[in-house]
Image (spheres, rainbow, N blue to C red):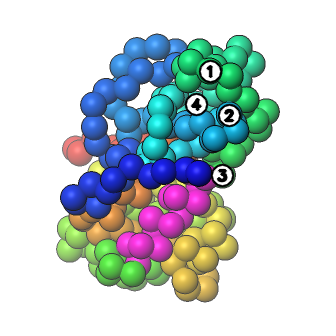
Amino acid sequence: RWRRRPSLANARDDVLEGALRTCIAGGGEHPPAGLIRLALSPDGVVTPDLAAKLGGRGAWISADPDAINRAVSKGLFSRAFKRTATAPADLASMIETGLERRALDALGLARRTGEAVTGFDQVKSALDKGKAAVLIAAADAGADGQGKLARAGRSLPRVTGFSSAALSAAFGKDGVVHAALLKGAAAQRFLTEARRLQGFRPGLIEAVEAAS
């Protein structure tokens, strides 16, 4: 049976903070927020531990499908776990799917805690008041609306890789095309997950423009 690590006092995921970790595929030490933790199931199967909460020895790897596929093909997990470890051939795809779910779940949590707004007018108002921290536009949003909000929030990170259907399901509201996360913990939590997902989906987050 899996055993989870004791919860932190502040109930934050371990992936958000902690000591530097070494990537088993590329070496070098990195903050855990940019890596993926993998655990070994009782029957020796490599399993994504995206919340970094499963007990036992863990292996850390960059949020990069090339690095993950290289680790699978070269048997690097057995070396990292110091025992026979079987990695699914589709491990990179499993991780990508899990990261997408965590990012969308973070949006739902932001809605429930009142740290998100949806709709063009509400997003524009949050921008005008300086309350927005992250802009979100559906991948299938109209160019005109996207452009207006992007110009108003040019100094903010902008996420454009989710469909309107996915955003609507996450926010629990039909027809979501434009959204913004307000300054606070929810925005940081979402960005942590989105940045890891961007390793699998280049361009998910648009670069922040320098202030003029």
Q: Is residue 110 found inside the magenta-colored segment of the image?
A: yes
* Residue 140: quarter of image: bottom right
Disc 1 marks which residue? 83
In front of the other: label 4 or label 1? 1
> Secondary structure beneath disc 4?
loop
| Label located before the other in sequence (3 or 4) | 4
Q: Is residue 54 above or below residue 121?
A: above
Around disc 3, counting alpha carbons within 10 Å, would you say few (fewer than 14), some (14 to 19), or many (20 or more)?
few
Around disc 1, counting alpha carbons within 10 Å, would you say few (fewer than 14), some (14 to 19), or many (20 or more)?
few
Disc 2 marks which residue? 44
Q: Is residue 71 above or below residue 13?
A: above
Give the CA distance from mark 2 to mark 3.
Answer: 22 Å
Residue 15 in picture, x, y percent from top left = 38, 44
The residue drawn where x is 45% and y is 52% is 4
> Secondary structure beneath disc 3?
helix
The reply to whether callout 1 and callout 2 are in contact (CB within 8 Å) is: yes
| Label located before the other in sequence (2 or 4) | 2
